[in-house]
Every structure is written in structure tokens, then in C-alpha cells.
Image (spheres, rainbow, N blue to C red):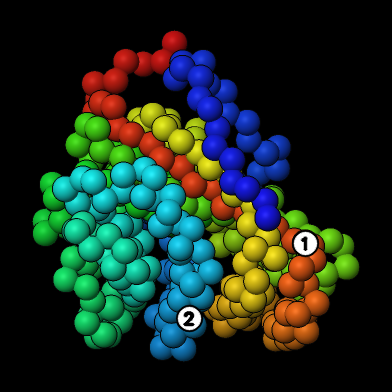
Amino acid sequence: MIEQHSTDYAPHAERRWAEPRTTSDMTPHVLAGNGIPSLTPGMMKAIEEEELLQEWERLLDVQTWALGESEVAWLRSGEFGAGRGVLEVGSAAGGYGCFLARNFSGTRIFGVEANPHLAARFRSGEAAPPNYSIEVSKIGEDPIPEAVRGRFDRCILRFVLQHVSDPARVLRAVHDALPVGGRIYVIEEDLSFLTTRPDWEPFQVTRDVWLRVTAAGGTDGMIGSKLPRLAEEAGFTVDDLNIVLRNNVEMGAAFGDYLTSVITLFQKNRPDLVTEDEVRTVADGFEASRDDHAGHFVATYPQFLMMATKVADRTHRHPRR
């Protein structure tokens, strides 16, 4: 098992963040009616059909099952539940938020979701924990909902920044909404660290499709290693960064199930980019290798987990020299 590694930080002014040379800055310049660049939520903006909504929920359920336990342990280490409340940006239909609310039962968690169709599924679904709710809002473009404003000093953004056209804008909005001393917890992927042995076809196909879809959607599938720079430019001080290379042995069957769910959703949402044959190759390949690779390390799945603190209001910060 590959252990997670935490980075020791030099003083703020001396930090130098290394980022991959490969860029995926393909953000489309979409203008709102007032001529101001619109915050575009990638493929999420297109999800309103019932079949796609159900597929998205299935993916998030598998994602929570595969990754949630280790994420909760990391959140506990960073005093996630110690404040007066948590803002969850990008709640989807509330599956992960409910999971967090049950694990942090003494913490009030306020979800906000840009896609009203996903939020509606939360309201019509099973009863949520009493410490969790969802409001509709596009953070970075809409104001913080009145029911939520001023009631949190923590914020979690899990697999959100990779799905928006302007992640810096979202981070600035969160920074401005938090009190001084407030903390953000960011969980992201970075496809430049998605690696495998060359002969494992289902994984190779998944990676190729993933890069294809993110590029076409104007979002950044390689955002993980850019998180520290983005956070500091938004006004945060980075407290901790964990780079975790999960692997197929550690995750077991969840490894293939998760990647199969990802490519299935991509195909249903973008059939012009992803073929049904590619989905079958991935699904059949992972199923056939479920037992063969149980003790054979052949692939990694990367997570970047960052904690950062708001040390001052942005308008009061001294300019960098």
C-alpha cells in the first residue's frame, strides 16, 4: 500500500509550488447577459435528464463508498467538525453531504448546489440527517444564500474545482464568505498522476476518455497539483497538503467499480465523445481482472487533499513584493 505523504511548509513568503508542465487551460469564454464572463460548471450544466441524474447519483455513491472513509479520517485530523458550521460547495443530490453529516453528527453542514435538478432530487429523496440541508446557489456567481450566510467557519469543496471554468473565482467567493480564521478543505484529483501498467486496457481507455471529456468541457482534470497556488492567490494560507496515490490493491473492487461508473456517466452525457464500445471495454476489463489484480499493484488513482486558512480579508492584505 502506498502511504499518503504530508508536506512540510516553509514560511509563507518563501514557498514555491511545483506544478506539472502540462496544462489543460481550455476554459471557454462564455459571457453572461451583462457581458461578464460566466462561471461555467463543465458537464454538470447539462445534467437535467432523469437518466443522467440517476447515473450521476450512482457515480457519487460509488465514489463515497470507495473514498469516503479515508477522507473522513483526514477531515477529523484537521478539526473539520470543530467550528460553528460547514459550507459544502457542490452538494449534488446530497449523498456525500449526508455521509459527512452522519460522521460529524454534532456539526451543522449547509450544502449549496448549482444544479437545481440535483438539489430537487435531494428534497424528494429519503430523509436527510437533521444537521444537513441543501440550498440552490452557484458559488462565485450568486450570493451566499441568506439561510446559510454567517453560519459557517469551515468549507469543503470535494471534486468541485475541477468541474468549473474558473476555480479561482470560486475560491475567492468562499474566502470572502468565511470569517478570518475560517478554513477550507479541498479534495481533488489530478489525471497527470493517473498511471498504470501499459497492458491494462480498461484503465488506459478510462484515462484517455477522462482527458478527452475534461478538455472538451473546458474544465481542468489536472487541477490537484495547482491547488496551493490557487488557494494562496485567493487569499488563503495553506496549512497542509496530502498527495495520496491510492492503488488497485488498496481499493479492491471499488477501484474498477469507480472508474467504470465514471466512464459510464461520460458516455451517457457525451455520446459524441465516448462510445458504447469504450464503456464495454472498461466494464468487461475491470470485471475480468477483479480477482487477478487483487494482490498485484498495477495502477494508481491520485487524490490531492488540501487544508487552508483565511488569515485576513482580501481587501486588507498587503500586496506581495
Outermost residue to the bottom: 51
Q: Position of residue 215 (x, y in %)?
A: 63, 58
| Residue ranking furthest to the right | 199
Q: Is residue 299 left or right of residue 226?
A: right
What percent of the width, then of the height, locates residue 107? 21, 57
Position of residue 11 measured from the top left corner of the image (x, y, whole percent): 46, 17
- Residue 184 placement: quadrant: top left
Tell me: residue 119, above or below residue 138: below
Q: Residue at x 60, y 61 (%)?
A: 214
For this rendering, which residue is in front, 22 or 86? 86
- Local SS, label 1: loop
151 relative to 132, above or below: above
Occupied quadrant, residue 146:
bottom left
Q: Mark 2 = which residue?
A: 58
Residue type of the residue flagged with mark 1: Phe
Q: Residue at x 63, y 48 (%)?
A: 3
Crowd rating for badge 1 (residues with CA inside 10 Å; few <14, some 14–19, many 20+): some
For disc 2, the neighbor class at 10 Å (few under 14, some 14 to 19, many from 20) is some
Considering only order in the chain, which callout, 1 or 2, is on the residue closer to the N terminus? 2
Provide the secondary structure element on which disc 2 rests.
helix
How far from the left and from the top, in percent, is residue 308? 38, 36
| Residue of label 1 | 297
Who's the residue at 32% across and 78% down the image? Answer: 117
20 relative to 91, above or below: above
Instruction: Tell me the distance, in whole angstroms, between the alpha carbons under discs 2 and 1.
Output: 26 Å
Q: Say which quarter of the image contains residue 32.
A: bottom left
